[in-house]
Amino acid sequence: MMTVNEVSKLTGVSIRTLQYYDRIGLLKPTEYTGAGYRLYDDAGLEKAAADFTV
């Protein structure tokens, strides 16, 4: 699992943009921690990459 910070560094997409994508339902995290942190897994990111590829 990766945090939103790790995903941001990996993809070059800002943390704010990832939070926005979550809010509008475009890229939902795999789960949230008890403290509310977003966690993403490889499968979810691969699906998102496929969805964003035109």
Image (cartoon, rainbow, N blue to C red):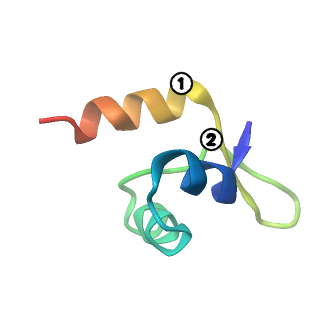
Seen at 48% across and 62% down, the residue is: 22
Amino acid type, residue under disc 2 in the picture: Thr
Residue 47 drawn at (x, y percent): 39, 29
Rendered image: mark on residue 43: 1
Q: Secondary structure at mark 2?
A: loop
- First in residue order: circle 1 vs circle 2: 2
- Vertical relation: 33 (above or below) 23: above
Seen at 25% across and 41% down, the residue is: 52
Most extreme residue toward the right is 34
Most extreme residue toward the left is 54
- Mark 1 or 2: in front is 1
- Vertical relation: 39 (above or below) 16: above
Quarter-of-image position of residue 53: top left
51 horizontally vs 18: left or right: left
Residue 43 drawn at (x, y percent): 53, 24
Q: Secondary structure at mark 1?
A: helix
Quadrant including the N terminus: top right
Amino acid type, residue under disc 1 in the picture: Ala
Along the line of sight, which residue is nearer the eye, 10 or 26?
10
Seen at 49% across and 35% down, the residue is: 45
Q: Within 10 Å of the Cα at label 1, are there few (<14), some (14-19), or many (20+) other Cα atoms? A: few
Quarter-of-image position of residue 46: top left
50 horizontally vs 30: left or right: left
Q: Within 10 Å of the Cα at label 2, are there few (<14), some (14-19), or many (20+) other Cα atoms? A: some
Cα distance in 3D space between marks 1 and 2: 9 Å
- Vertical relation: 46 (above or below) 19: above
52 horizontally vs 26: left or right: left
Which residue position is annotated with label 2? Answer: 30
Quadrant including the C terminus: top left
Badge 1 vs badge 2, beta-carbon distance below 8 Å:
yes
Residue 23 drawn at (x, y percent): 46, 69
Quarter-of-image position of residue 37: bottom right
